[in-house]
Image: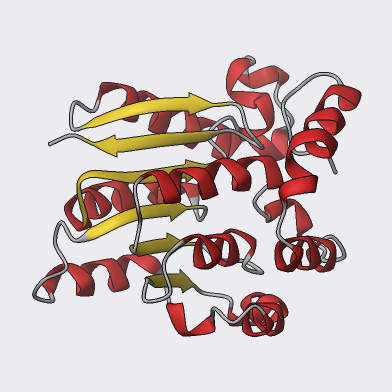
Amino acid sequence: MQKGLLKSEELYQYVLETSVFPREPEPLRELRNITANHPWAKMATSPDAGQFMAMLLQLVNAKKTIEVGVFTGYSLLLTALSIPEDGKIVAIDVDREAYEIGLPIIRKAGVEHKIDFMESEALPVLDKLLKEHGNESSFDFAFVDADKINYWNYHERLLKLVKVGGIVIYDNSLWRGSVAVPEEEAPEHLRFCRQLTIEHNKFLAADSRVQISHASLGDGITICRRIC
């Protein structure tokens, strides 16, 4: 299933085949192909968004990161491949079974030691991190692809955990394009999260604590850079 918002399937495939797939590391390619057989494959991070994230991770010299929502681990693996050998990722997901689909590939890539996977709801883990000495304003990067109803709650905690100049990225910020159409024209199964996404987008646009960029990669990603 094509995750991009470009109206032309041919144009999206051109981007993938010309700029993304030739540069995609083999472990990511292998994990992407395995994930394609999963019933919820559409939940995976799109490879074009992943390529952009990998560049951002390296541009900010990220070493200490958080991932809220892991699924089979495509974005987790690309993060682990992008950060230094002694870098660390706090990875949180309620579904360890999905994570274990990608775990053999993560191990084969030699980056499992960078990952601290926690099978849990995210809010308790984020609150625990905030209570522990030395975590506040210490993370370089965070990626969120989880339950949309808690995006605001995640944002408030992550802005305390990520340092000034650090990056927080939210996935699915265009919700299959439904944010741009009247509610009655949106497919019924998209409407609840469509409204949550619209509200979160407005919240981020008005948040003076972050510099933002809304990119139409994959299902839409919003990049927030903490400025205060």
Residue 115, x across and y down, in percent: 46, 78
Location of residue 81 by image quarter: bottom right
> Within the image, what quadrant is residue 5 found in?
top right
Residue drawn 60% across and 16% down?
180
44 to 227, vertically: above or below: below
Tell me if 121 is positioned left or right of 37 in this view.
Answer: left
**Residue 165, percent from left and from top:** 23, 41
Residue 116, visible in the rendered structure: no
Front in this rendered view, residue 149 or 77: 77
Quadrant, the C terminus: top left
Report the number of discs. Answer: 0
Q: Quadrant of the N terminus?
A: top right
Q: Residue at x 27, y 67 (%)?
A: 126
In the picture, measured across the screen, residue 156 lies left or right of residue 92, that is left
- Residue 190, compared with residue 150, is above or below; it is above
Q: Viewed as shown, does residue 66 lie left or right of 228?
A: right
In this view of the protein, which residue sits in the foreground, 218 or 23?
Answer: 23
Q: Position of residue 135 (x, y in %)?
A: 16, 68
**Residue 38, can we see it?**
yes
Seen as rendered, the residue at the extreme left is 133
Q: Residue at x 70, y 47 (%)?
A: 47
Give the image location of residue 72, x and y in percent: 66, 69
Residue positioned 58% across, 76% down in the render:
95
Q: Residue furthest right?
A: 10
Q: Please, which colouring scheme is shown?
A: secondary structure
